[in-house]
Image (spheres, coloured by chain):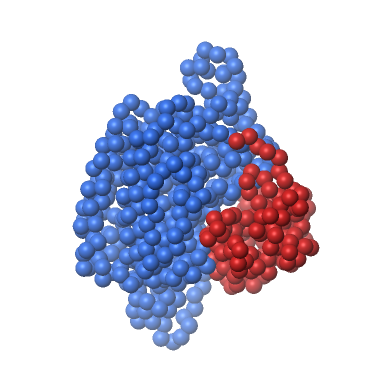
Amino acid sequence: MPLSPAITDLEQLKSHPAVARLHGWNAEAVQQVKFDRDEMTIVVDRSALREACALLREDPACPFNFLSDVTCVDWYPAEPRFEVVYHLLSIPKKERVRLKVRLNSSSVTIDSLTPIWPGANYFEREVFDLFGVRFAGHPYLRRIMMPEDWEGHPLRKDYPVEGYR
Amino acid sequence: MAHMTPTPVLEPGQDRTMILNMGPQHPSTHGVLRVLLEIDGETVVRLMPDIGYLHTGIEKTCEAKFYQQVVPLTDRIDYLCPMTNNLCYVLAVEKLLGLEIPPKAQWLRVLLNELTRINSHLVWLGTHAMDIGALTVFLYCFREREEVLRLFEAVSGQRMMTSYFRVGGVALEPPLGFFDRVRDFAGYFPEKVDEYENLLTGNPIWLMRTKGVAKMTAEDAIALGATGPTLRGSGVDIDLRRDMPYSSYEKFQFKVPVAQEGDVFARYMCRVQELRESTEIVRQALDGMPEGPIKANAPHVVLPDREKMKTQMESLIYHFKIITEGFAVPAGEVYQAVESPRGEMGYYIVSDGTAKPYRVHMRSACFANLQTLSKMCEGHLLADVVAAIGSIDIVLGEIDR
C-alpha cells in the first residue's frame, strides 16, 4: 500500500471516537490531531492528560480501557523537547489511539496515570529512568533499569551512545 | 556492579514480618530476577520485583544503526521467540515505508512464527513443570524443542538468533525438503502434546499446586496491563492475530483458547491449547503456501540476489548503496503490535527521514505482565510464588532490554 499523505484537519477526523470525545469535552485541550499510516495521534495539553485518559477509559461508545504502552521521544535541541507518548487500546472495539503530551525542557513534570491504570507504574518508571521525565503522583518513582546511583538519563539525545567517559 | 546498594528498600511493616531475598540467582526466576518478599511466617505480605540486571540499552543502540542492522538486535531481546521480534520490527518498518510484501513471504512468516510459539511454549512448559516438581515433562519438552530448533537451523543457519526476516520479505528461500520436515513435525506433534497432558492435566499433585493458586480477576489483569495467556487465563478474549490481524493471519482459521478461572491452571490450559492451535496454523500454512517471490520488488530497500549482484551493474550499485548508506525511511511514526507467545509485543518507531531510526521503543509483554505478580501473590503462601512466576512466563532479556 503506497503511503497516502497524513490528514491533520480536525474537521475531517471528528468521526474517530477518541477525537470526538475529547473535542466535545474540551476543545482547547486538543492541540493537534494527525491521522497517518492508519494510526490516530492526538496531542493533548499537559494539564488535561489525566482527565482525558479517564474520559476515554469510560467512554460508553468506544472504551479505551487498556493502556498498552508509555514511552518518550527526545527532540533535543528543539523545544518543546520531550514528547511523552501513550498508546491506548480499546479491547471491546479493537481500536487504538496514540496520545501525546509535549514538554519543555524547563519543566519536565507530568501527571502520572497510575491512579487510572496501575499498570502505568513500570512504564513511567522506565521513562523517568531513561529520560528524566517526572511523573507527579507516582507511588514509587525510582530508577528501574539503571543502578540507583547512575548519573544521567541514557536515552536522552545528548547522552553519548558509549556513555560518559 | 549494578544494584550494589540494597535497593529497592522494603522495610518490615510489623514486628512479626521479615524480609526475604529471592534471586537474582534463584533457579526458578528464569533469568536474573530479584524478588523482595516481606513474609509473615509462610504468608507473603508484600512482594516487590527488582529488575534491570540484564539491561543492555538495546533501544539506544538501535538509534545508532541503519534500519536493516537493527534486525539482529531484535533477536536478542527475547531469545525464546526471535522470529516474533523480527516480525514485529520488520512489520513496523514496512508500515513506515508503505511497502507491500509478497504473499509467500507473509505465509512463511506466519509458519515460522507459529513454530516459534511452539518452541517458546515448550521451554515454558518444561521449566514451569520443573519449578513445581514435575521433572519428566522438562525432558519430553526439550526433545520436541530440539526438532523445532533444527528446523530453524535449516531455514536460517542459526538455532536461536535466527535474524531470518528482512525489511521487505525474508532472507532466503527455505532449503529443499524443509516443508516436508515441517509437515512431519506437525503430524506427530499433537500426540506429544497428549503425552505432556497425560503427565500433568489430570495429575492430582499438579492440580493441587496450580488450581486456585495465584488468582487474578479480569479487571485487575486489564488495569495492570497484562496481555497474552496471562490475560486470556482471566477470561478476557483478545488475541491480536485474530482481532487486529497482520501478515495474512486473517486467512487462517484457529481458535483462541480462553479460560475463566484466572489461576495458574487456567494459564497453563491456555498455553497448552495454544500448542495445538499453533500446530493447526502451521498445517494450514503448509497446505496453502502460495508460489512466488519471497522479497518485495523494492530495489532501494531489499538487497538484490547474489547472482544478480555478480552479473548486473545496477544490482551491484543498489547493493553497495544499501550496505554503505542504508535506505531512507519517510518521516513519521508507527506502533506495530503482534501477539508474541507472551502477549502484546509492540514496536514504536519514529523516523526523521534518514537511514537510521530516530527512536525505537519495544513494548515488552513480560515487562507489563510482571506487574501482576504482586497482585497474584500477596496474602498467599510463599511456596506459590514459584508457581506464579512460572505461570506468567517471563523472559528477563525482554523485560530489561
Q: Residue furthest bottom?
A: B15
* Residue at figure coordinates x 43%, y 36% from the top left: B107
Q: Residue furthest top?
A: B311
- The residue positioned 35% from the left and 47% from the top of the image is B278
Residue B290 higher or lower than B222, as above or below: above
Q: Position of residue B204 (x, y in %)?
A: 21, 68
Q: Nearer the viewer, residue B185 or B321?
A: B185
Q: Quadrant of residue A64?
A: bottom right
Front residue of B287/A129: it is B287
On the image, the x and y values in percent for residue B173 come to 41, 27
Chain in red in the render: A
Q: Is residue B369 visible?
A: no
Which chain is blue in the picture?
B
Where residue A20 sits in the image (x, y, percent)? 70, 60
Q: Return the x and y of residue B233 as percentages of the image width and height.
A: 39, 63
- Indicate whether B112 appears above or below A13: above
The residue sitting at 30% across, 70% down in the picture is B211
Q: How many marks?
A: 0
Residue B70 seen:
yes
> In this rendering, is residue B10 above or below A19?
below
Nearer-the-camera pick, B387 or B294? B294
Residue at the image position 65 percent from the left and 33 percent from the top: B328
Query: In the drawing, does residue B162 fall left or right of residue B330?
Result: left
- Left or right position of B215 against B66: left
Left or right relative to B218: residue A128: right
Q: Which of the pair B70/B312 is nearer the observer?
A: B312
